[in-house]
Image (spheres, rainbow, N blue to C red):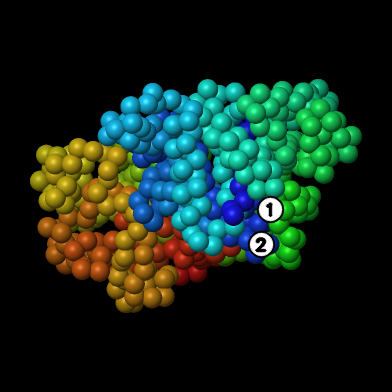
């Protein structure tokens, strides 16, 4: 029988349930257990694919093309759990399925209700995720939102039912709350007491409390929380503020014996813990010397979570190169004035530029094109991802081939040189939640290229999320003018990577390598990009 851990949150949002759940998953994997991570999102959207990055941050893409909540990115970076559509459950998916079944007569004329029909569908999806792998030992289910939110009630009720049906030795509740600091460093436990009371009103008695606080809770506060919240003192843990990196949190929890307490409550025999990978991450972090300044030129720079996986992958590249990465967030809109682009970018003293993918509309696109041109002409290491490749190609068309109107058909349908365009079979697609090229695809790298040097093999697979492609109509012109096309789909029909000639490191890809980067193993493209920026700092060619 699988064991279940339900992770919920209280007091306020953005406490870090995803990182806490992921850190616990990392520790349990270190104990030799196979972990399945599941996210329950209360929003009515079917998935995160059509939501603006301003609203919900980035959409994390899985191998099977699911567009999910960014917390699945945390799951991927902290654990080895293979992720798919089954690991992401939304209210939209649940109600969509239940309503379809009702229309098809599956409920034999019964009145369809939240309990049991909606909760049964939630439970079915949770158990289905556990069965994705026959080797799953423990399922960690993160319930989005905050206890007390009306949207989260069906998911909490489903969790209550599973805990009741399986018993406390097979399913437990881990509740994350806030311990605010008032006045001169006085920690207040009352909000946590109220949060646990709200959980109890839902019929769930938390077994373990993780308290977000500015500092480690002392024994007196832990005993007080345990007494008023009806939990064991040994089951009250602190997730205190750290100055280093979120990748220290598994070690923080390990030092407090969180994984041991969890296993004891689940009746799993204790086994040797392997935390060497996380110790190595922190050793590499502390050993970093020097700094590279990487400019990220995008449209959603005010909201950190909009490019969450990009920032994490850059950090991983810094770890592997032994150098700190300073993120310089640059809004692309001011760069649309080409007369000001040089002075603006020169003023940042950048060692590299990255242009990420994603975004709605044409706001700031010309600024990205100008940034690409600046990096190309000034020999600054450049990494373009998805849209970042597209602006490289538009830049080349405009300023090398001399096609002043070169553009993407996505932004200018009247251009005579649509160097980026839809494939013929995509012209009539109106369902923007069903992007045509999405999920895992194979690519073939050309020999003696930057991308081949990074992967060190002829063929690799990465995740895509886009509709517009490099236009094959202009492939010959681009090649003859010097642009290097260095990776393709296996049948050579689609261009997956372009590189600049006579440049220290200028590369763009149509896929999203950031989704596969980990702190314990930086993605090779991010590793090589940061290495190129490091060489620029040192004045190496």
181 sits to left or right of 360: right
Q: Position of residue 410 (x, y in %)?
A: 21, 41
31 sits to left or right of 292: right
> For the residue labelled by badge 2, is the local secondary structure a helix, a strand or a loop?
helix
> For the residue labelled by badge 1, is the local secondary structure a helix, a strand or a loop?
helix
The 10 Å Cα crowd at callout 2, few under 14, some 14 to 19, many 20 or more, is many
Q: Is residue 70 visible?
A: no
Q: Which of 392 and 209 is in front in this view?
A: 209
Residue visible at 16% across and 52% down? 423
Front label number (2 vs 1): 2
Number of numbered discs overlaid on the protein picture = 2
Residue visible at 54% across and 27% down? 153
Q: Where is residue 212 in the image (x, y as percent from the top left)?
A: 71, 36
129 sits to left or right of 336: right
> If the image is split into quadrants, where does the N terminus sit?
bottom right
Residue 188 vs 245, above or below: the answer is above
Q: In which quarter of the image is residue 218?
A: top right
**Which residue matches tag 2?**
30
């Amino acid at each position: 029988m699988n064991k279940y851990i339900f992770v919920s949150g209280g007091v306020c949002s953005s406490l870090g349930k995803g990182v806490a759940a992921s850190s616990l998953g990392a520790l349990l994997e270190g104990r030799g257990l196979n972990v399945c991570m599941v996210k329950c999102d209360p929003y009515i959207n079917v998935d995160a694919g059509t939501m603006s990055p301003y609203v919900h941050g980035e959409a994390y893409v899985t191998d099977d093309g699911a567009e999910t909540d960014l917390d699945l990115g945390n799951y991927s970076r902290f654990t080895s759990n293979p992720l798919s559509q089954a690991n992401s459950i939304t209210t939209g998916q649940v109600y969509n399925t239940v309503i379809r079944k009702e229309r098809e007569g599956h409920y034999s004329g019964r009145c369809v209700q939240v309990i049991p029909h909606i909760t049964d569908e939630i439970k079915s999806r949770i158990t289905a995720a556990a069965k994705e792998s026959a080797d799953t030992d423990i399922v960690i289910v993160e319930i989005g939102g905050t206890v007390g939110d009306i949207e989260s009630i069906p998911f909490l009720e489903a969790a209550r039912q599973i805990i009741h049906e399986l018993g406390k030795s097979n399913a437990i509740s881990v509740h994350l709350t806030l311990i605010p600091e008032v006045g001169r460093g006085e920690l207040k436990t009352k909000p946590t007491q109220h949060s646990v009371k709200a959980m109890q009103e839902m019929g769930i008695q938390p077994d373990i409390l993780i308290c977000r606080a500015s500092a480690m809770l002392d024994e007196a506060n832990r005993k007080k929380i345990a007494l008023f919240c009806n939990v064991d003192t040994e089951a009250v843990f602190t997730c205190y503020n750290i100055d280093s990196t979120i990748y220290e949190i598994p070690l923080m929890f390990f030092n407090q014996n969180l994984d041991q307490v969890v296993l004891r409550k689940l009746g799993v025999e204790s086994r040797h813990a392997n935390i060497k990978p996380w110790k190595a991450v922190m050793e590499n972090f502390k050993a970093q010397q020097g700094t590279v300044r990487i400019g990220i030129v995008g449209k959603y720079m005010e909201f950190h979570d909009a490019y969450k996986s990009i920032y994490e992958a850059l950090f991983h590249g810094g770890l592997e190169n032994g150098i700190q990465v300073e993120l310089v967030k640059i809004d692309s809109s001011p760069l649309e004035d080409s007369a000001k682009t040089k002075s603006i970018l020169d003023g940042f003293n950048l060692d590299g530029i990255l242009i990420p993918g994603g975004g709605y509309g044409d706001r700031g696109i010309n600024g990205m094109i100008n940034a690409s041109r600046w990096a190309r002409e000034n020999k600054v290491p450049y990494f373009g991802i998805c849209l970042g490749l597209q602006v490289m190609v538009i830049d080349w068309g405009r300023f090398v081939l001399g096609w002043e109107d070169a553009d993407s058909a996505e932004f200018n349908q009247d251009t005579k040189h649509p160097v980026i365009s839809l494939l013929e079979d995509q012209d009539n697609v109106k369902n923007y939640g069903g992007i045509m090229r999405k999920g895992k695809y194979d690519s073939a790298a050309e020999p003696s290229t930057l991308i081949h040097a990074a992967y060190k093999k002829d063929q690799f697979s990465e995740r895509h999320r886009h509709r517009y492609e490099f236009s094959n109509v202009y492939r010959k012109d681009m090649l003859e003018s010097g642009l290097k096309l260095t990776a393709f789909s296996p049948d050579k029909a689609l261009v997956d990577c372009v590189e600049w000639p006579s440049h220290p490191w200028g590369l763009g890809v149509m896929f999203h390598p950031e989704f596969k980067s980990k702190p314990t193993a930086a993605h090779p493209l991010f590793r090589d990009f940061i290495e190129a920026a490091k060489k620029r700092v040192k004045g190496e060619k």
